[in-house]
Amino acid sequence: MNNVQPSNLYNSKKFTTFIETIDQIQDHRVDRNKLHSLTNIIVIIIFSMLGGANNPSEIKRFGDRHYKWFRSVLDLKHGIPSRPTISRMLGALDPMQLS
């Protein structure tokens, strides 16, 4: 991910459309359990899986390794989500909404 410059990606119409599309996915979590935005979690999951991560632990490690890059394109007030959070979100996402 070092060859993708955040400023170029963030200003890209395709990336903006990607984020706007993800923002439309319904978040069924209880408000008090929303430390991380659903959009941030999904973006981290997708980019991590594209980078070869295959499970919640690998997604967490990928996010930690690329934290600086993710922080440059996402609002990560609370850092990368924990492995249990990633795992819960993978189980709760509706594949039809992602398609």
Image (tube, rainbow, N blue to C red):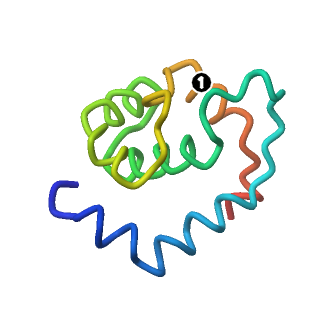
Corner quadrant of residue 62: top left
Residue at 59% across, 24% down: 85
Give residue 84's position: percent from left, percent from top.
Answer: 57, 18
Residue at 66 percent of width and 26 percent of height: 88
**Quick one: which residue is furthest to the left in this view?**
3
Residues 74 and 49: in front is 74
Residue in the picture at 78% in, 22% down:
32
Which residue lies at the image location 29% right of the left edge and 72% below the top edge?
8
Locate the N terminus and report the quarter of the image it occupies: bottom left
Check disc 1 and report its element: helix, strand or loop: helix
| Residue 52 at x, y percent in the picture | 32, 45
Task: Tell me: residue 44, above or below residue 80.
Answer: below
Dot 1 corresponds to which residue? 85
Number of callouts: 1
Residue 83 x, y percent position in the rendering: 49, 21
Q: Amino acid at mark 1?
A: Thr
Q: Position of residue 11 (x, y in %)?
A: 39, 74
Q: Quadrant of the C terminus?
A: bottom right
Res 27 → quadrant: top right
For the residue pair 78 and 43, the one nearer the viewer reads as 78
Left or right: residue 16 compared with residue 37: left
Looking at the rendering, which quadrant does residue 73 occupy?
bottom left
- The residue closer to the viewer here, 74 or 96, is 74
Task: Name the residue nearer the viewer: 82 or 33.
Answer: 33
Is residue 52 shown left or right of residue 37?
Answer: left
Circle 1 residues within 10 Å: few <14, some 14–19, many ≥20: some
Residue 11's place in the image compared with 92, above or below, is below
> In this image, 32 relative to 21: left or right?
right
